[in-house]
Structures are given as structure tokens and as C-alpha cells.
Image (cartoon, coloured by chain):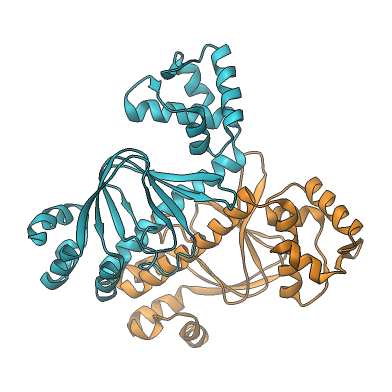
Chain colours: A cyan, B orange
Amino acid sequence: MSRTMFDPIYKEIFPFWDKISETDKDYICQNSYTITYPKDTNIHDGNECSGVIFVRSGSLRLSIMSDEGKDITLYRLHQRDMCMLSASCVLQTITFDVFINAEEDSECYVISGPAFAAVSERNPSIKIFALETAVSRFSDVMWVMQQILFMSLDKRLAIFLSDESARTGSNTITLTHGQIAKYIGSAREAVSRMLKYFTNEKIVEVSRGGIKILDKKRLRKLAL
Amino acid sequence: MSRTMFDPIYKEIFPFWDKISETDKDYICQNSYTITYPKDTNIHDGNECSGVIFVRSGSLRLSIMSDEGKDITLYRLHQRDMCMLSASCVLQTITFDVFINAEEDSECYVISGPAFAAVSERNPSIKIFALETAVSRFSDVMWVMQQILFMSLDKRLAIFLSDESARTGSNTITLTHGQIAKYIGSAREAVSRMLKYFTNEKIVEVSRGGIKILDKKRLRKLAL
């Protein structure tokens, strides 16, 4: 039953699927399940092993958090993305904790961490895939780090609004200032101030419904 | 000749050495060389492939840099450490650039990137080793990121001075305020201000010769 259900999915997702034994395929499928996380669920917080998570629909947000509760978004996972950082028991060289939160209702496939680890010990191709997934996230995180540490707020905000508008296919961004501040690693007050500046410049219009982009051209120029 | 020279070194350094063919061992050794970088040499700056670097003696500093030349230390490599980020041609999922600088006279072994990549394509154990090295640096970088983004300057400075004193086995840290600022991702002025505060508190004594730790206990307390 679980094999019939997961086999076609994993065949499509995993580059290693055709290289591993039938027994290992069965074992992975038997240790897989589907789960729906309602919006705002905390899926993972810290170093326990929540398993390898695939996003079937929705969106997950990965962040790091300070003792005082300040958090910074590392990246978001959308449809067809896979999370290795939630399965810290699989990659022993990962020694930091991340927090994962469903920012929309999200349907996911999860493979139990110990099962994935056991099979990857027997199959170098799986281990390589898992490590490469983690290393590509390393690149994402370095990008965020450079953004936060080096880039001025107007540029960061302009990039975020442009990207978000492109992603959702809408000129209106329906996020609060606090949410945007989290995404770009800034403070709510600073974001509100910059949005006021953008409003004065007729680049955006801020209302209760969200932030409407009025001048795409200038926003794109700011983002350069 | 190169085989006789590098074989005993690689046997000790590489967990995969005994698992690969004699041909591959020869190939790696033939594409290895030793090099001495004088202090303050820029070894690597950006995305070219400088090869896989091992530190035999001395110390290398890895950093990221903004367009304006502001730089932030990611980590330092000491004796027996290995750098994969200098060999971006080996790990294609690494898409960011780092800068590497010799902060002391440093003797290194270097394996050419394309040679390492070719042999790792044939040997999963090498690929896994290279990826695991990169992922463990990912953990280092996350630590730095949390330090810079979340931690107050007094704590960061106290940790740095304690670590540096433990590393060198001396109570005197012979670095300039500017150098320390780079290591902890802060501004020189901020470090000087905090050192003045530490001086007033009789925790350290600042002179031309460097920063002398007077009260280890309090420094350690600050670092908690």
C-alpha cells in the first residue's frame, strides 16, 4: 500500500531511486507518511529529528532564533522542495538548530530520519544526494547573510517586494510589516519607515489590504 | 617522486585513501603541490577554482566581502584543516564566493580542483568526504551568523578574547582593534569602545604590545 502510493512520487523526486534495491525502496516507503500542517504550525524547533520533509503544496519557512525570540528567515521551501535540516540525525556534520514553520496550509511527505539514515548508509548515491541538498541550502544562507550584513534596507525591501510580487503573480503584497521585517532580517519599525518613504515616492501604496506596487520600474531600479 | 612525498600525508588526512585505486592515488599525488603563502597574501578571491587546500602550518582566514569592501570572517583554518570552498569547481552546489587570506606565513598542500573533481566522480567515498567537509563549515558559518545577528558585542568580544588566549596559550592578544573587529563582525570603533569599557572594569589592559587579560574569571563570565 505505502509502496504503491510513494513509489511514483519518489521515482520523480529522487535521482537515486532507480539505483537502490527493491528492499530499500520498500523500507523507505514503509517509513513515509503524508501530513498536512495547518498555517502557522511549528513543525520543527531545534535538534530533534523530524525526518526528511518534502513540500507537496504550501510553503514552509526556515529560520534561526535568538534566546530573546528574535528570528531571521534563512529560506522558504515551496512545492517540490526538500528539507534536510529537519533531519539532523541524517547529517551528523550539521550541528545547528533551525525552526520550521508552515506559513500556509502545507501538505508534506515525510520520511522518518532513522529510516532515511539507515538506507543512506548502504547507498552512497543517497548520501551524496542528501549532502548536496544541504550544501545548496548553504549557498542560500550565504546569500541571506550577505543581504542582511551588507545591503542597505531600501535595496533589501525593494528586492523582497519585487520577488514576492513575481512569485504570487500579484501587484499587491498581503503581508504585514512585521512579517516582511522577519523575511528580510530587519525591524518592523524600520520596514514601516521605509515603506512610508516608498509611499511618498509613489513607488507603493499602503492600505489595510496590503502593499500595492505602483511603480514597478523604480522598484526594480532600487533592487539593482 | 610526488607519490612518495604525498602518499604518507594523504594516508593520514583522508579517510578514503585506502579505498581508492592506485591509479587514482597516483593521479591525485601528481596533481598536488606544496606552497608557502607569506603573511597577508590573498590566496583566493571569488569563484575561480584554486584547488583543495590543506593547511600544514600557519593560518588562513575565510571571509565574505561587500561591494564596498566591508568584510566578515566566516572562520579560520589552522593546521590539518582543509578548505573545500576554494575549490568551487568540485562542489557545484556551492554558488557563493569567499575570500581567503593568509593571516600568518602559511605552508599548504594544494590538490588541483579539476583533478580532485575527476577522481571524486569515480569514487563516491571522496565525494561524500568533500561534501561532509563543506557541510561542517556550513555549521561554522551558522554559528558566526548567530553571533553577529543575535549576540551583544560584550559577549562576542569576551568569547573572542578567551578563545584567542586559549588558542595561543598566552594572556596577551597581539591583534589590532581593527583585526578583532573583523573577526567578530563588528566595527573597529565599537571594539575600541568595548575594550575601553573592559579596561575600566580591570578585565583587560590595553597597550601597544596588545591586549592583556587581567581577569580571566570575569571574562569567562561575560562569555556565558
A95 relative to A26 in the view: left or right: right
Compared with B124, A131 (above or below) is: above
Q: Residue at (29%, 70%) from the top-left corner?
A: A114
Q: Residue at (16%, 63%) from the top-left corner?
A: A29
Picture quadrant of residue A198: top right
B129 relative to B176 in the view: left or right: left
In which quadrant of the rendered image does the C terminus of chain B lie?
Answer: bottom right
Residue A12 rendering spot, x and y as whole percentages: 17, 52
Residue A224 visible from this viewpoint: no
Residue A11 rendering spot, x and y as whole percentages: 15, 56
Compared with A11, A28 (above or below) is: below
Residue B12 rendering spot, x and y as whole percentages: 49, 85
Residue in the foreground of this view, choosing between B201 and B29: B201
Residue A201 rendering spot, x and y as whole percentages: 56, 13
Compared with B3, B204 (above or below) is: above
Q: Residue at (34%, 81%) from the top-left corner?
A: B20
Residue A84 visible from this viewpoint: yes
